[in-house]
Image (cartoon, helix red, strand yellow):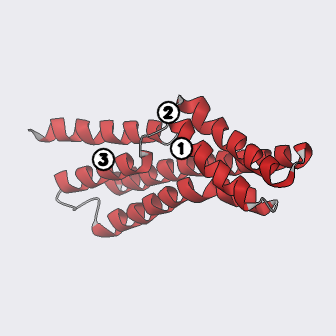
Amino acid sequence: MGDAALWILSAVLMLVGVAGTVLPALPGTLFVLAGIVLGAWIDDFTRIGWGSVATVTVLAVLAWGLDFVAGLLGAQRVGASRQAIVGAALGTVAGIFLGLVGVLFMPLVGAAVGEYLAQKDHRRAVEVGLATWLGITAGLIAKVVIAFMMIGIFVAALLI
């Protein structure tokens, strides 16, 4: 495979990665990282050195962690019950099978149902569900920003 094909593959991996930051079941920042590492490797790590690769790796790990904790932090911030947190986690898993809408809203439903089962209070259940949804939405926005930061570091290293 020639260098041009490898550069195209690098760019495709990064584009798939950006899409994967919002699409379910795609490890977006992992694809962005793979594209960046491939680009660095093609260039023998001359323009995109180990420092840049290490920086984008740390950002990718940070984004990966956000996937797991964003919704839970939103729920915990309003004092959600253990059942609400379990419900949010189960809703997240169920949402993966329902596409983007499921990933976005099933954690809200799961947290609300869990909180309702724990407290028998409709208002409180809705509050916890919304807090969970806001946490997930903030995490999603942060992942997209981090993916673009990673690509920005890559492009800056290539051009400078």
Mark 2: secondary structure: loop
Q: Nearer the viewer, mark 2 or mark 3?
A: 2
Give x and y (percent) for residue 99: 52, 30
Q: Nearer the viewer, mark 1 or mark 3?
A: 1
The answer to whether residue 118 is left or right of residue 143 is right
Three-letter amino acid code at the position of disc 3: Gly
Q: Residue tagged by mark 2?
A: 97
Q: Alpha-carbon distance for marks 2 and 1?
A: 8 Å
Q: Which residue is drawn at 77% across and 60% down?
A: 81
Give x and y (percent) for residue 5: 17, 35
Mark 3: secondary structure: helix
Q: 83 or 50, which lies in front? A: 83
Q: Which mark is residue 78?
A: none
Residue 48 in view: yes
Residue 74 in view: no
Q: 27 or 151, which lies in front? A: 27
| CB contact under 8 Å: marks 1 and 3 | no
Mark 1: secondary structure: helix
Three-letter amino acid code at the position of disc 1: Val
Q: Quadrant of the C terminus?
A: bottom left
Q: In this view, does 152 lie above or below 21?
A: below
| Mark 1: few/some/many CA within 10 Å (<14, 14-19, 20+) | some
| CB contact under 8 Å: marks 2 and 3 | no
Q: Residue tagged by mark 3?
A: 35
Q: In which quarter of the image is the N terminus?
A: top left
Q: Residue tagged by mark 1?
A: 93
Q: Alpha-carbon distance for marks 1 and 3?
A: 27 Å
Q: 138 or 80, which lies in front? A: 80
